[in-house]
Image: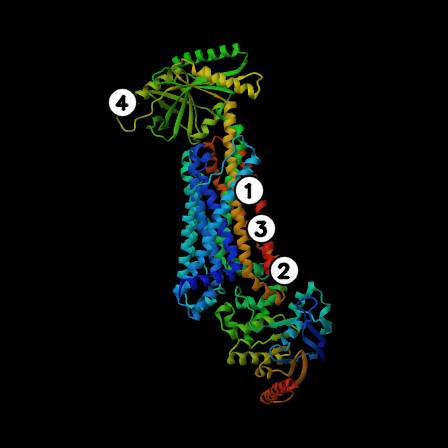
Amino acid sequence: MTFMQVANVKKVYTQRLGTKGTEALKDVNFSVDKGEFVAIMGESGSGKTTLLNILSTLDHATEGEVYLDGTPLSSIKDRSISRFRREQLGFVFQDFNLLDNFSLKDNILLPLVLARTNITEMEKRLTPLSETLGIAHLLDHYPYEVSGGQKQRAAVARALITKPKILLADEPTGALDSKSSQNLLEQFEAIHQSGQTILMVTHSAQAASYSSRVLFIRDGRVYHEIYRGDQTKSAYLEKITQALLVTSNRGESDES
Amino acid sequence: MNLSFISKLAWRNIRSNRQLYIPYVVSAALTVAMFMMMASLLDNQFIQERAATLPVLFGLGTIVIGIFSLIFIFYINSFLMKRRKKELGLYNILGLEKKHVNAILGTETFLAGGSSILMGILIGTLFGELSFLFLNYLLNFPEPLEYVHNWTAVFMTIGLFAGIFILTTVYNMVQVTFANPIKLLKGSKEGEKEPKGSWLLFILGLASLFAGYFISLTIQDPITALSQFFIAVLLVIIGTYLLFTVGSTVVLKALKKNKSFYYRPGPFISVSGMLYRMKQHAVGLANITILSVMVIIAVSSTVTLFVGSEQTLDNRFPAENNISFATPPEMTGAELKAETEIDFDEVTAYSEENGWNIENSRSFQYINFFGEFRNQTFIPKKTSFKLEGMVMMIPLEEFNKINNSRYQLKANELLYYTQNTDFSDQTLTIGEEDYQVNPLEDVPEMLEARIQLVDFSIVVLPTMQDIEQARIYYNQLAEENSSEEEGYAVNAWSADYYWDLADTTPEENLQYAAEMSDLNETSEAEAYTLYQSKEVSRQEWYSLNGGFLFLGIFLGGLFTLGALLITYFKQISEGFDDRDRIQIMQKVGLDRETTRKATHSQIVWMFTLPILTAGLHTAFAYPIIHKMLILFGTTSHQTLIICTVGVVAAFALIYYIIYRVTSRVYLNIVE
């Protein structure tokens, strides 16, 4: 069942009026099914962050449309966009984006507070989530008092506490060491197995190997995709690495 | 590393941190200007010459502004340093030694501080000059006040602020030297810790505040009021800073603990933000509070003086024309009586001759004995400059005359009026006589002004002879003890004559006053006579109180500028602090409306708290202000209360506007 549909999305950045803009996205088409864990891979400058920004309503597409659960994103009015973001989407950022003036607990509760959820409901959701993510003992600490991996897990908890339709992650392991990365990705895998739809942007094949499908993006287009299917993780990783290798070689041959 | 490299680096730092440095230099320069204007008032001719208490009051005011400047510069420095710690830590990691970082910091402060002082002096001079021109034009006094430029003020300003900037540099250097680079790198992220020993500070603050209030509430007379005012002010300032620092933390923490309150969008964002920088926040609020109180007191007291001028004149001069007689100690009451009658006959004759119609003439005579009743006996005071206790003794006949009353007294009975509400004695001993006490409830109107000034009581004795005996008795006592260093005061008769003229204009009153002064000079009376005209005094009075009003408005404006400065600086610096946080929150679903709501929920703190505290301080300062105003001749509670309430309301409005405008600046930065 198609859950998120990206149809003919194009994004042009114009710096000044009249100058020909930079085409960040040319013609992106793909769809995400409910319960899928999709990784989007691409080198820097390939347009993956632009794509994520459009999916997360932080930016608008120049042409084309994104549908989430049947709703076209462009139909959401500016006034209710924050609310939409708060209720339907969950975000995990590369640099965590936790607030130093809040304890981890308050950071996690932030979207619920903004949604005016009552406190008993908040705590009811917080307890199991923080236990799953292994940060229950850190809830009263402040972000500058815990490690990067712990910060990112708190950020994941913040993204999940609203029970979003889709979790959007932008290079979630980008600022983490390998052990923390592995730990976080295992969490993602577990979350995915519990039925959560995840869309993750990454340039790490290791990270992508935890997904159920990888989309490759280059020069503003999706040019390849790999399904994990029944493969073992190492076989899947092998395939992803090969695909990356092939594309980079092809890139060179294109240029020559 | 050579000096030119360091100064180049320092200059580049200032330029690349101009978002931080511009508000810093602007705020510091305006603080310098504020102090500069206050200090130049010290040499103002009006302040030096018009009233003995003014130089003292303005000296105290300058000290308070100086202390305030110190606190404020440290306050804006703390914002700057917090944001710069990361950069300084980076220098450390990149291989600059701490002494190099210190040299850079020192140079930066030298540049920023130096330009602030320079700009401040220029602004102060210009603004002082302009505001004096404007106020002179606005209030339209016969004698315009002049703004004096003087080098003393300039040097004082330079000295003070150079000292303050050096102190902040030393403070910054200590911070950099004793912190490790990693900690510096994180410096701008870590929240402020709760102040240490908060209970002790809380108790200290409370004690200081109550001591200040206590001084004001228990002040006995105007003269002590003046000398203790400064101590009370200092105590209240210290109390305010301490209680705000400790109190706001306690309150904010309690609010945070109240989950159903805290976990709502507005409080969630604002309470956590305030807790994050609680000390800075508290000092900012305390600064605003102190300045608000200064505005309110400066303006309301001078407005009261001005508005109350007419009432003051009525108090001092029961009639249009007044002659007071003072006699040598050996003169008897009967002799004075004869002399005043001759003198007044002369006045009457002269007036009739020249076509003036005298009406409402009245007179009375009395002796003011220095001392008080203790253990039912009159105890004379030693001579000293303090006007403490005074007992006015009036013969019954004289008293009934001015009071339009028909009291009767038997021999060895007296009428007694005192402000001491506990008084319940049945007999009083004066000289060698015992008297039965009959309480006197009301004071004649023309004596009301006197009872306010000092601890004053009135004794009405059956005959002039009774007072004569007392005079002789106590003067003899004084003579016997005259060899002592502090003898007793010598007592002598006084008399007052009052009269009006029928159907005269103010100009005619002035003319009559001139003629009377001349006549008075030719008087051959043995008693010393002083003629005073209400109309002449009225003119002097209005020019004096007009000058006070001028200074009050000037100071009010100056302090309002200070409050504006703090609010502005607070909003700008917190805006830059909060920008990243708000943007992160917007990413996870904070909408503009809620951002605005959260900002507005700070109104309770930023607006209401300083104004309410300022109101409370003003209320407790009321007794001491009232006492000090008595020194300047205004006694009316009604006028003072109305003026104070009016000024508080007006200032609250002005501050509200300042707050709203600056909070828009904040929102613009954040969004």
Q: Amino acid at mark 3?
A: Tyr
Q: Earlier in the sequence, mark 4 or mark 1?
A: 4
Q: Is residue B404 visible?
A: no
Q: Residues within 10 Å of mark 3 (few under 14, many from 20)?
A: many
Question: Mark 4 to mark 1: distance in Å?
Answer: 56 Å
Q: Amino acid at mark 4?
A: Glu
Q: Please give the label number shown on residue B594.
A: 2
Q: Secondary structure at mark 2?
A: helix
For mark 2, name the chain.
Answer: B
**Label 4 belongs to which residue?**
B480
**Label 1 belongs to which residue?**
B648
Q: Nearer the viewer, residue B277 or B195?
A: B277
For mark 3, name the chain.
Answer: B
Q: Earlier in the sequence, mark 3 or mark 4?
A: 4
**Image position, residue A180 (x, y; %):** 52, 78
Frontmost of labels 2 and 4 is: 2
Q: Nearer the viewer, residue B417 or B234?
A: B234
Q: Quadrant of residue B177?
A: bottom left
Mark 4–mark 1 contact, CB under 8 Å?
no
**Image position, residue A21 (x, y; %):** 68, 71
**Label 3 belongs to which residue?**
B659
Q: Earlier in the sequence, mark 3 or mark 1?
A: 1
Q: Secondary structure at mark 1?
A: helix
Q: Nearer the viewer, residue B388 or B501?
A: B501
Q: Is residue A56 left or right of residue B164?
A: right
Q: Earlier in the sequence, mark 2 or mark 1?
A: 2
Which residue lies at the image location 46% right of the left edge and 30% below the top edge? B452
Q: Amino acid at mark 2?
A: Thr
Q: Residues within 10 Å of mark 2 (few under 14, many from 20)?
A: some
Vertically, is B62 above or below B477?
below
Question: Mark 2 to mark 4: distance in Å?
Answer: 85 Å
